[in-house]
Image (cartoon, rainbow, N blue to C red):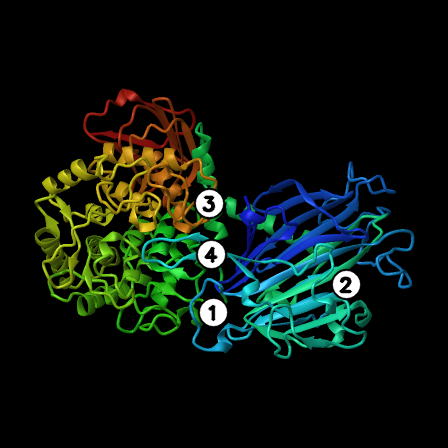
Amino acid sequence: MDAQFGNLILIRDKPDRRDVPGAQECFLSSVIQFQPLARLGIRGPDGVVPLMPISAFSDPVTAHKVFEGGGIRLSQELVVSGDEASLSLRVERVDGGVGLSGEGTAMSLGAPPSPGSGLSVGAAPTPSNAAPGEGADGPAFTLTVDGACLFSPQGVPYHWRDESLLCVRCSGGGQSGLDGEWNYGRLPFSLRSSLRFDSLAIRKVADDEIIRTHYFTSFNLKKRYTYWVEAALEPGGRRVDSRLAACGAGGHEAGQGRGSSSDAGICAGVSAGAADAGGAAESGALPVTARNVGYEATIDLGDLREAREIVLAFGIGRAAEKAEASAGHHAALIRSVEADWDDFLEGVPGFHADDKGLERMYCTSWFILKANRVHFDDPRFPYPFTSVNKHHYYNQFFWDSAYQSIAWLWYNRAEPAQDELRNFATNQWRNGMIPYELFMYPVNGREWMDGDGTSTGMTQPPVIGIALSEIYRKYGSAEYLRFFYEPLLRYEEWFTLYRDLGKRGLSCYLNIWETGWDNSPRLDASARNRVLDPAIESADFNAYIYYMRRTILEMAAALGEKAPPRIAERMEATRRSMNTLMYDPADGFYHDLVAGTEERIPVKTAAGLIPLVTDIPEKAVRERIVSEYVESEKEFMSGCPVPSVSRSEPTYNPIDFWRGANWPQITWTVIFSLADSNPETAGAILHRFLASTKENTTCYEYYDAETGKGVGMPFQGWGALYTDMLMRFVAGVIPENRGMRFHPLPAELGDFSADNIRLKDTVLDVGRKGSTWTFRFHDFGGFAMEGVHDFRATPTADGARLRIEFGPGCDRNLMVPLPGENRLEFRFG
C-alpha cells in the first residue's frame, strides 16, 4: 500500500521517487498538488549525506520508512487523518556514537520520549556561539526540507488569473512553518515543524522547473502527465539561491527566485537570526503569490550525539489553523485513525477464501471505498460521497456514484449506499436534468460552456435506475424511495422533452462526455468538437433509461403512488424503436443511431450488450447475442472479459481506454444481465474476470482486456465492485425486499466462507466446502445443503420463523439442519 488517505488529502509515494525521504505526492481536493510535499535531506560537514532506503512498510493507518547512509539513519512515520497529516522523523547516527545505536531502541516513531531517554524534541542542541556547520563538540548536521505547491497542473485553462493563484507566507503561529491559501477557492493550508526552521525561503516556481512525465495517451484524448519539482541544490549541498541563508537578521527580502520573473514578492526568506522561538513567523517576510510556489527550509540537528526527533504537520481547510507539530498530536492522530478503522470494519462482512487473491481484492475493495469517501463542507454537498479517485477525479460523477453505491450495498450500515446519489437529486437542475458531474469548486467547471460553473449542463448514463432498485431491495427504506421519486419523474420527463429528437422513445446524448465512453470508436465519426458533437442515440444510454423507467414504476407501487401513464407508454416506444431501428438482424447486434435518423453506426462495442439488462430483446434475439457475441472468443469473451470493443473490430486495443480495455462496471452489468437467463455464460465471464484481475494490488479504473493487468487509474471507486461480484455472484446472496434469494453462478472459484451479511430481516453466514454449502441465519437457525439448489428465504408474517422455499425437483434429503435452535420452515416445490 503506497498511499495514505484522509478526507481531502491523499499522500502517496511517487513510483519513480520511492527512494526520496519524506512525503512525496500530496493531492488536495481537486485543484492543488504538492510535488513533493516535504522532501527531506541531511547535510553534514562533507556535504549531502547519501541516504538510501533500507525498509518500508505501510498499512491503512501509517506508513513507515527507514533510510541510511554515511553513518546516519533517518526513520519516518506518516499518518493522515481527516484533513490533517503528520510526519514523525527520527534522525540518529549509527556509527557507534554515545547512545546512538539504532539497534534495540525502545522508542517508537511518533511517541513522546520516555523520561531519561536522552531524546530531545523541539530543542536546538547547537549553542548560539558555535561556528556555522560545527556543534559544540563536533561537526553539525542539517535537515533540509523542501516542497512545491502546484495549482491544478493537469487542469483546464482558467478564465481569470486570480482563479489560479496561491498565496504562501511564513507562519504566523507559534511554530515554524508556512501558511498558504488558494484565495479563490477559500482553501487554506499550513505546514508546521516541531523544531524551528533555521532558514526558510518561499519562492515562485517557474514553469520550466516543473518536470512533466508523460504516462498516458489515447486516441482523441489529451495527454496526461505526472509532475515533480527538484530541490534547488548544488552537488555540494548548497542552495542555488544564496538568500536562503542571507536574508538579513531582523528583516525580510523579496526579489527574483530561480528561473522566475522580477515581480516583487517572488521570493521571500528568513534566517535563524531573524527568528525567535516562534520561528520564521516573526520576521514579517512578504508572501509569495503565484500559480506554483516552492519552499526550502533547514533545521540545525547539531552533532547528533543524541538522536533528534522532529514532527512535521500539515493541514488544510479548517484543520490548517489548528495544525500542531508535536509527538503527542502525532500519536493522537494515529489513535483517531485506528478508532475510525475499527468502527468502519464493524460494518464489513467477513470473507475468507482458499484463493487468497480473491480474499485480498475483497479487502482492497473496502479499503478503496472508505479511502475515497469525502465529507465536503459546502451546502451543495449535504451528503458524504465516494470520490471517483482522490488523486485525479475528486469531484462527484453521476454514473460512477451509481456503481459505487452498488459496491457499498454489502456494508452493514445503509447510509453509504443510500447517501451516495442524494447529492445529485439535491443539485438537479430546474428543467429536470441531473448533471453528470458536481464540481467541488466552481473553477473546475468553467471549461463547460453549457454549465453553471458548479455542475455540468450535461447528464450521463442513468445507472441510477439499477442502483436505486438494488439498494431498496437490500435495505427496504420507503423514505429512501420517497427522496428520489419526484426527482426521478422530473428527470424522466427531461429526457423526452429535451433529448428525444424524433419523439420515438429514443433519447440522445449531445457530446462524447455524456456517454462516459470518452474515446470509443463508436464516436469516431461524430466526435469532432468534443463538446458540440452531432447527437447520437445509443443502445446503452436508452437501455439505462428504460431500466430507470421500470424502477419508477416499482417505486410508485412501493410508495402507494399512481405512476403517470406516460412511463409505461414511453417504455413501449423505446422497446419498439430499439428492436426495429437499433437492432440489425443482418449481424444480430444493437447499434447506435445518428439521432433522429435510421442511420446505424456500424461499430460493435460493449454498449450493444447493455440492452440485455432489460427485457427489450426478444428471446431469440437475446440468445443470438449471447451465443454469437458474448460467448464468442472472436468477439467479447476475451482473456479478461468484457472488452469495451469487440475483438473483431480493427480499432480493438486491449489496453486503450474505451477502445478495447476492460471496464469493471461494464463487466458487472453484463454479468448482472445474464445471471438469471444465462447463468453458465455469466459464470464464465465472472471466472475469467476474477481469475485475471485478482493479482492486482489495488482496484483500477480499467484493465487490460487480455491479461487483466490494471492499466487505468489505481484506487478507482467502481473498481471496488468486487464486493458485489463476490457476495452476489459467488456467494449467491441476492437481496430481495423481504429476505433473499440464493442463486450463485457456476464460476468454480474454490472454497470460501462469508459471515455477518446483514439483510433486512436477518444476518447470514454462508460458506462452501467442496460440494457442500452451509447457511446460518442468525436468530433462526441453519442448514447444510449438498450441491447447488436455488431457494428463497423469507420471514413469515409474524417474524417468528424463516421460510426456505426451494424450486421444483429439489430433494429434501439433501438438506441437513445444523445443531442448535432452528426456526426454519422448509418448503419444496
Q: Residues within 10 Å of mark 3 (few under 14, many from 20)?
A: many
The answer to whether residue 261 is above or below residue 412 is: below
The residue type indicated by label 4 comes to: Tyr
Secondary structure found at label 1: loop
The residue type indicated by label 1 comes to: Asp
Secondary structure found at label 4: strand
> In the rendered structure, which disc, 3 or 2, sits on the residue that comes first in sequence?
2
| Residue on which the image places disc 4 | 225
Residue 142, percent across and down?
A: 78, 56
The answer to whether residue 357 is above or below residue 31 is: above
Secondary structure found at label 3: helix
Callout 3–callout 1 Cβ contact below 8 Å: no
| Residue on which the image places disc 3 | 366
Q: Nearer the viewer, mark 4 or mark 3?
A: 4
Q: Residues within 10 Å of mark 1 (few under 14, many from 20)?
A: few
| Residue on which the image places disc 2 | 196
Residue 157, percent across and down?
A: 43, 70
Callout 4–callout 3 Cβ contact below 8 Å: no
Based on the displayed image, in which of its 4 quarters is residue 273 positioned? bottom right
Q: Nearer the viewer, mark 2 or mark 1?
A: 2
Q: Residues within 10 Å of mark 4 (few under 14, many from 20)?
A: some
| Residue on which the image places disc 1 | 378
Q: Nearer the viewer, mark 3 or mark 2?
A: 2
Callout 3–callout 2 Cβ contact below 8 Å: no
The residue type indicated by label 2 comes to: Arg
For the residues labelled 3 and 2, the Cα–Cα distance comes to: 40 Å
